[in-house]
């Protein structure tokens, strides 16, 4: 499955896009990016085009219009993603960005608490600057070489790294759930030649 992970921001929104096995195993991170959603780039075939000619969206200085353009500019990732992970914001954070993305892709979006991510990676005792360093180290272990080179071009890497950490946290939860399901299946029945467990075969004769 394809998973899009987003570390919420306005000027520094971190994004990563990955292929993940159904059991939660991370196969490969295909793409990362750091985006200033307040800038209307109107990219098309690598060129900036006239908004009046090409863009049907509104262009006011509002979070709603910024998010619309962010989604429009990254439409292939949002459409191809089977799962979208969005960093859950604190009450005084960028909740508008979080909720606008969440509402547009409600059926496949999960809000991920940064506290849970920090706890999973044992980062809760660190301050902000220390967490930045460690999140970059964690992400670097999973970023392929061609993307690692690309990341050197960004002025801030930890926002992208945070999106990767969100992805890794979710993969771990997915894997744990998968392992529990597998243990239950092994515990509650032996598979027969037809692929059904004893309980599933008996279920066929229920009235």
Image (tube, grey):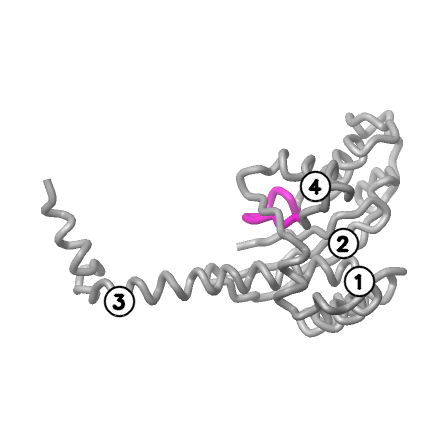
What stretch of residues is rendered in magenta? Answer: 77-86
* Mark number, residue 14: 2
CB of mark 1 within 8 Å of CB of mark 2?
yes
- CA distance separating discs 3 and 4: 40 Å
Residue on which the image places disc 3: 187
Q: Position of residue 167 (x, y in %)?
A: 63, 59
Residue 171 horizontal side relative to residue 190, left or right: right
Mark 4 residue element: helix
Q: Residues within 10 Å of mark 2 (few under 14, many from 20)?
A: many
CB of mark 3 within 8 Å of CB of mark 4?
no
Residue located 75% across and 34% down the image: 68
* Mark number, residue 158: 1
- CA distance separating discs 3 and 1: 43 Å
Say which label, 3 or 4, has the lower sequence index: 4
Magenta includes 37?
A: no
* Total numbered badges shown on the rendered structure: 4
- CA distance separating discs 4 and 2: 13 Å
Residue located 50% across and 62% down the image: 24
Q: Quadrant of residue 129?
A: bottom right
Residue on which the image places disc 4: 98
- The residue lying toward the viewer, choosing from 169 and 42, is 169
- CA distance separating discs 4 and 1: 19 Å
Mark 2 residue element: strand
Q: Position of residue 93 (x, y in %)?
A: 77, 44
Residue 155 horizontal side relative to residue 175, left or right: right
């Amino acid at each position: 499955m394809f998973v899009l992970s987003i570390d919420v921001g306005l000027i520094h929104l971190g994004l990563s896009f990955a292929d993940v096995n159904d059991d939660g195993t991370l196969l490969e991170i295909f793409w990362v990016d750091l985006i200033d959603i307040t800038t209307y780039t109107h990219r098309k075939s690598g060129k900036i085009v006239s908004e009046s000619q090409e863009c049907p969206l509104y262009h006011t200085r509002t979070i709603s219009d910024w998010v619309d353009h962010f989604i429009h500019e990254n439409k292939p990732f949002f459409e191809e993603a089977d799962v979208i992970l969005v960093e859950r914001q604190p009450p005084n954070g960028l909740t508008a960005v979080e909720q606008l993305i969440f509402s547009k892709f409600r059926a496949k979006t999960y809000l991920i608490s940064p506290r849970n991510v920090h706890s999973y990676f044992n980062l809760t005792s660190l301050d902000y600057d220390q967490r930045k360093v460690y999140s970059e180290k964690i992400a670097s272990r999973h970023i392929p070489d061609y993307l690692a080179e690309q990341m050197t071009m960004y002025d801030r890497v930890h926002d992208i790294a945070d999106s990767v950490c969100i992805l890794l946290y979710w993969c771990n939860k997915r894997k744990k759930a998968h392992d529990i399901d597998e243990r239950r299946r092994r515990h509650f029945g032996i598979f027969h030649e037809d692929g059904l467990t004893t309980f599933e075969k008996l279920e066929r004769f229920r009235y």
